[in-house]
Amino acid sequence: MAVRPILIAPDPRLKAVSATVQKVDAEIRKLAEDMADSMYAADGIGLAAVQIGVPKRVIVMDLDQKDDKKNWRAFINPKILWASEEMAIFEEGCLSVPEIWDDVERPARIKAEYLDLNGKRVEIEADGMLATCLQHEMDHLEGVLFIDHFSRLKRSMAIKKLTKAKKLAS
Ligand code: K2U
Ligand code: ZN
């Protein structure tokens, strides 16, 4: 059990492109467990390793949290194999971008592959919140935050608000 601090934007470490995991071993499994602990501690439903300062292509998600039942899963080296032309809009937030919520448009349905914690290749089809959250987390693996999808003006206002909040917190 290890809750690790979550990086808050603006932070150059969140812009890193995360490295492919070469071997799903005990170290990666411990990283995923720490990520899950950190995600639950922050009341999140998803988290990318780069958000706790580890630029490796590892994501954890738990979209089914009900009365404290934990049912997280890890997505290692995820790849999108297909994305629908149809788009969907969801209001997104991010544990690394506090107090900012806004609509982001993304492909409504995706087909993706990833490795599970046993190193086994898994292929899924996703829509709804799973599709949105997985795409949001996969953006993190490329150093992209959901506010980077905003218009120039809206993004600069978000960065200004985050910078001010960080100064007040320090
Ligand atoms: O990277 C993240 O922090 C993941 C988001 C999950 C999410 C992605 C896309 C759309 C909605 C949610 C967080 O785990 S959950 C959102 C959140 C943000 C701030 C505070 C609490 C929860
Ligand atoms: Zn995020």
Image (cartoon, grey):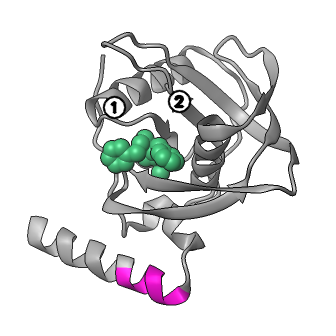
Query: In the figure, 39 relative to 74: above or below?
Result: below
Percent x, y of residue 163: 27, 76
Left/right placement of residue 49 relative to residue 4 reads: right
Percent x, y of residue 130: 63, 35
Distance between the alpha carbons at the discs numbered 1 and 2 = 10 Å
Query: In the figure, 132 relative to 28: above or below?
Result: below
Q: Is residue 117 magenta?
A: no
Question: Amino acid type of disc 1?
Answer: Ser
Image quarter where the C terminus lies is: bottom left
Q: Residue furthest bottom?
A: 153
Q: Residue at x 74, y 23 (%)?
A: 115
Q: Residues within 10 Å of mark 2 (few under 14, many from 20)?
A: many
Q: Does residue 130 appear in the picture of this structure?
A: yes
Question: Amino acid type of disc 2?
Answer: Val
Residue topped by disc 1: 38
Percent x, y of residue 95: 36, 49
Of the image marks 1 and 2, the number of the one nearer the N terminus: 1
Q: Residue at x 15, y 74 (%)?
A: 167
Percent x, y of residue 79: 79, 41
Give SS at disc 1: helix
Q: Is residue 155 magenta?
A: yes
Q: Residues within 10 Å of mark 1 (few under 14, many from 20)?
A: many
Q: Does residue 144 appear in the picture of this structure?
A: no
Ligand 1 image-quadrant field: top left
Question: Front-most of 133 and 114?
Answer: 133
Residue topped by disc 2: 60
